[in-house]
Amino acid sequence: MSVTAGAHERIEVEVTVNGVPRAAEVPPRRLLSDFLRHDLRLTGTHVGCEHGVCGACTILLDGAPIRSCLAFAVSVHGRELTTVEGLAADDGTLHPVQAAFQDQHGLQCGYCTPGFVMSACGFLAETTEPDDDEIREGMSGNLCRCTGYAGILAAVKQAAGDLRASGADPRSQHQPEDDAFAGRPGGEHGPAGGDGGGEVPS
Amino acid sequence: MTTRSVGAPVARSEDPRLLRGEGRYLDDLGHDAFQIAMVRSPHAHARVLDIDVSGALEVEGLIAIHTFEDLPPRLQEPLPLLLPHPSLTAGRTQHLLADGEVNHVGEAVVMVTATDRYAAEDAAERILVEYDPLPAVVGPERARAAEHAVHDDVPDNVAAHLEQSIGDAPAAIGAAPNRLRFRLDIERSASTPMEGRGTYARWDGDDERVRLHTSTQAPTSVRAAVAAFLGLQLAQVECIAPDIGGGFGVKIMHPWPEEILVPWAARELGHDVKFTEDRREHFVSANHERAQVHWIDVGFDDDGRVLGLDVEFIHDHGAYIPYGLIVPIITSTQLIGPYKLENYRVVFDSVYTNTTPVSPYRGAGRPQGCFAMERTIDRIAAHLGKDRTEVRSVNFLQPEEMPYDFGLTFQDGRPLRYDSGDFPASLEKLKQLVDWDGFEERRAAAEAEGRLLGIGLATYVEGTGVGPYEGGHVLIEPGGTVQVSTGLSTQGQGHQTVFAQIVADELGVDLADVRVVTGDTRRFPYAVGTFASRAAVMSGNAIHLAARRVREKALRIASEALEVDAEDLELADGQARVVGSPDTAIDLKVVATLSNPLRYAFDESARIATQFANPGKEGQPPVTDDDEPGLEATDYYSPMSSTFANGMHAVEVSVDPDTSDIEVVRYAVVHDCGPLLNPRIVQGQVLGGVAQGVGGALYERMAYDEHGQLQNASFMDFLMPYATEVPSVDIDHLETPSPLNPLGIKGAGEAGVIPGAAAIAAAIEDATGVVIDAMPISPSQLHEQRLTTAQDRPGDTT
Ligand code: FES
Ligand code: FES
C-alpha cells in the first residue's frame, strides 16, 4: 500500500480478484463495493442498501462471504477476492450453483442474484450436506423482493447435491471438463433440466 | 420437428447472463458520468426561506449546483398530472426542485452535480437551506379533519371525491334482516425493489440527440416527457430501460424529477450525467401506496347473502397526486371480488398528507379492496355462525353468468365486465388443497401441543391486461435470427423467454434463434407500459399477431419460390416445407433473403436465394404496392376491455399463546390466469407475490411519526421478509381461458400479493378469537389486542 501525499489522499490498493491481480488508486473512504463496481468495473456485484442488510453485495474474501458495502477498499489490500464474475468457466458454462439457480427458477430480476450465488458458494463450502432448515437459515442473510425464495432454496439444495457429486470446491471457478457438468447449456437457451416447480425445502 | 414451447416450463433465456454477473443495470452504465446528489427536505412541511451554497463551492469535484431559480421556465413547471379524472378537482403535482415550499421529507430542493457521487454528497452536505417549518398533516384522518392544509389552496386537503353505485345500497341495507357496521384499516407500504431508481443521460452535441437509460416501467412515456420538457423533437430522444432490478409498480411513475433533470443537466454541461439513488432516498422520495381507512355498512340475509354493501373510504395519496385516482378507483371496483353484488355504493375521498406521494404498488388498491370485502364476508359468517366458505359460496357469481357487467366503471374508463372464471370450482380446489374440512382436527392437535392454530381464506378478482394497446415487431433476418421487440420494459418477469416461446411456435423456429428486446424506443417507439399485470396479455398477443403476419408472408414467398400452394406448406425446424413431403423445403433465412429484392451475395443464403430468384411479375415493380421488402411485420393488440383473472388463498397460522408470535404454517393458492404460457414463470410470479403479501400482512409498514418523519427508512427497520419469514406455498391452477384475446390468457403479475393481508388476518382471528380489523399486525400489537379482548370478555381465558 503506497500513500500519495496531498489534500485528496489516494491510496494504491492491490488485490487479487478472481485469480487476477488488480490495482487502483482510491481515496481511503472508497467502499469495497464501489471499488469493485466502478474502479475495477466488475459490476456483477450489486448494491441494494449499502448498510449491510440486503446481502446483494456479497463477495468472498479469502474464501469467506462478506458484504462488500461494509468494507473499505483499502482494508482488503493484498487479499484474495471472488466475485460472481469469477464462477463460470472460461467458455461461459455456468458454475453448478449458477446452473441450479437457472434450473430452479431462483431468479427473476436478477438484482439480488449475485449476492445469493456468492452466499450460497460460501455456505456450501462450509456445509456440504445441508438439510432444508439449514439451507433456509444459510440463505437468510440475503433479501430478494421478486422470487419469494422458493426457487432460491431449491437451487441451493440442487447445487449441494451436484457439488457433492463432483467434489468441486464451490468457491472456485467452474472447470467443465473436470466433472459431470460439461456441456450444460448454461450459455444459451434450453431446457437446462429442472421442472420449474422445483422441490422446495420446507 | 420443433416442439411446441408455449405451455412448457422452459428455462429462462435471460438467466445465464444475469447469473454470470453480466447484467447491465442502470448503475452499471456510465462509469465516467458526472453524478447527481440531491439536497432533500428534512421537513415534512416547510417554506424554503434561503439556500446558501457558498460552503459547497470549494468541494473538489463539484461541477454545478442548481436550485429551482436556476432552472429555465419550462423546467419550473410542475410535473404533469398523468391521469386526469373529472372528479380530481384539486390535483397538485410536484416541481422538479422545490419552489419555495416542501411537502414531504425527501422532496428534492437542490441538485448537485459532481465528478462522482462521493463528491456530490460532500457538496450537498455543505449546502445550507433555511426552512420555516409548517404543521405537518400525517395520516388520512388528520388530513380529512383539515386542521391544517398541505397545500394552501386546497384547504380541505381533498383532491377528489368520487362515488359509484349499483342499485340502491342504503335502501337494501335498511331493509335487510341483518346489518353490521365496522371500520377497516390498511397502513402504508411500498414496492421497495432491490434496485432503486436511476437515470443516466448522454447528450450527443454532434447529433443533437439525447440517449437516456432509466430504470423505468414506462420508457416510451419517459421519452415523450423528456422531449416535452427539454423542447426536443421526439426523434432527438432515445429512451432505453436497461436490466431493471425489480419494479413492482414504483417505476411506473414517470417522469420522476430526476428523469427530466438528468438529461437536461447532460445537455447543459455537455457531459454524461447519472443519478443513482441510495436506499434512504428510495424510502423517502420514491412513491408509496396502500394507506386507506374504510367504513363498511353491510346488510345480509340469514344465509349470509349480501343484500347491500356501502363502503366509504379515505385514500391517503401523500403530498402530490401525479398518478391520479387509479389506486382508489381500483379499490372501489375490485373490492367486489367474485361476488354478485346488486346493491353497492362506494365513496372515497383522496386526500393530501405531508408524506411521500402515492402511485401503484403491485396490487394497486386491490389488497385494500380484498381486505375490505373478505373481512366483511368473514364478519357475516361469524355473525351467523356459518362456515366461511359457505357464505362465500352463496354470494359467488356463477360461471354461466359470464360475461357479467356490474354497471361500474373500471380503471381503464371502460365498464367493469368479468369475462371468465369459475369461482365455485376454484373454491372447491382450494378446499381440497388446504384440506379445509380436516382443519378442526389439526386445530385440536395443535391445541394439545399448546399452540393456537387458525385458518383463513380470501378470494379476489383482478382486472388485468388493461388497454389501450401494446405493439410487437417480428423480423426474420437473412442470417436466420428472429428479432422481436415490444415497447414495454421488463423487471424480471421473463418476457424475453415467454415472448420468444410465442414467436418460436408461430414461426416453427428454435427458441435459441429468437432474440427479444423490450423497453428500447430505438426498437419500438409505441408502448403503454408494464403495469396492471398487462405485459404478457398485451405484448404477448401483439407479438403473436405480428409473428402470424410474418408467418403468412413467409408462406407466400415460399410458395412462390417452391411453386406450391401456401396451404400445402408448414413452418417447422426453421424451414417452410411441404406438409407430408418435408424434403421439398426452403430455409426461412433464404425466404428472408428472398423478401428483399436487393441482395448481394454476402452469404450462403443469398447464394441459395439466387436459385429461386423470381424475376418479378410482368408489368409490376420489384416491390408491389401491397408489399414491403423484408420478412417482418408489426402488429398491435388493443382489447375492448380488461380481462379478469381470479384466485383464492388459504392460510394456516400458528400463534404462540404466551408471546403472540405469529407463524404462517401453511399457504395454499388456487389461481386462474387462463392458459399458462410458461408454468415455471407464472409460478414464480405467484410465489413472489405471496412473499410480498406475507410481508405486507406481518412485517412491512411505513412508520411515520406525527411530524411526518419516516422512522424506518432503511432495510434495518422496514422489515422485508427473508427466506426464514416466507412459508412454503402449495399452488394449483384453474385455466379458464379469456375469450378476449387470441392466446386466451389473463395477467398473473400481481395476483400473489392481493389476498395476503385478508387471508392472514382471517387466520389470526380464527386462531385467537380477536377481531382483526387493521393490517399489518405485529406480535406485540396482537398481544395487546388479545389482552384487551380478554378484559372485555371476563371469563374468556384465551
Ligand atoms: S448493499 Fe451491502 S448488504 Fe445491502
Ligand atoms: S430476483 Fe429480483 S430481487 Fe431477487
Image (cartoon, rainbow, N blue to C red):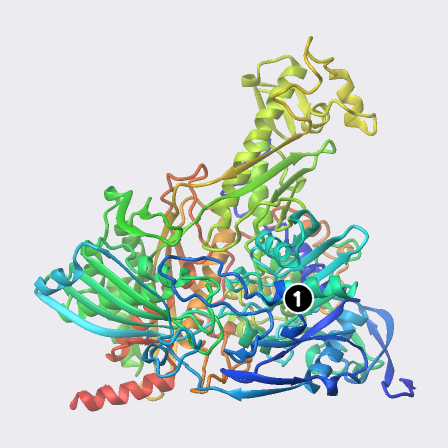
Residue B2 lies in quadrant: top right
Q: Residue furthest top?
A: B618
Query: Is residue A31 at all visible to an observer of this figure?
Result: no
Looking at the image, residue B679 sits to the left or right of residue B384; the answer is: right
Q: Position of residue B389 (x, y in %)?
A: 23, 61
What residue sits 14% from the left and 64% below the top?
B299
Residue B798 lies in quadrant: bottom left
Q: Position of residue A9 (x, y in %)?
A: 86, 86
Please say if A142 is above or below B310. Answer: below
Q: Position of residue B567 (x, y in %)?
A: 54, 18
**Of B266 and A114, the residue lying toward us:** B266
Q: Position of residue B404 (x, y in %)?
A: 27, 45
Q: Quadrant of ligand 1?
A: bottom right
Please say if B787 is above or below A18. Answer: below
Number of numbered discs: 1
Report which residue position mark 1 lands on.
B72
Q: What residue type is disc 1 on? A: Pro
Please say if B278 is above or below B747. Answer: below
SS at mark 1 in the image: loop
Please say if B761 is above or below B458. Answer: below
Looking at the image, residue B658 sits to the left or right of residue B243; the answer is: left
Looking at the image, residue B748 sits to the left or right of residue B130; the answer is: left
**Of A185 and B17, the residue lying toward us:** B17
Q: Quadrant of the N terminus of chain B?
A: top right
Does the numbered disc 1 mark a residue whose Cβ is under 8 Å from ligand 1? no
What residue sits 26% from the left and 49% below the top?
B407
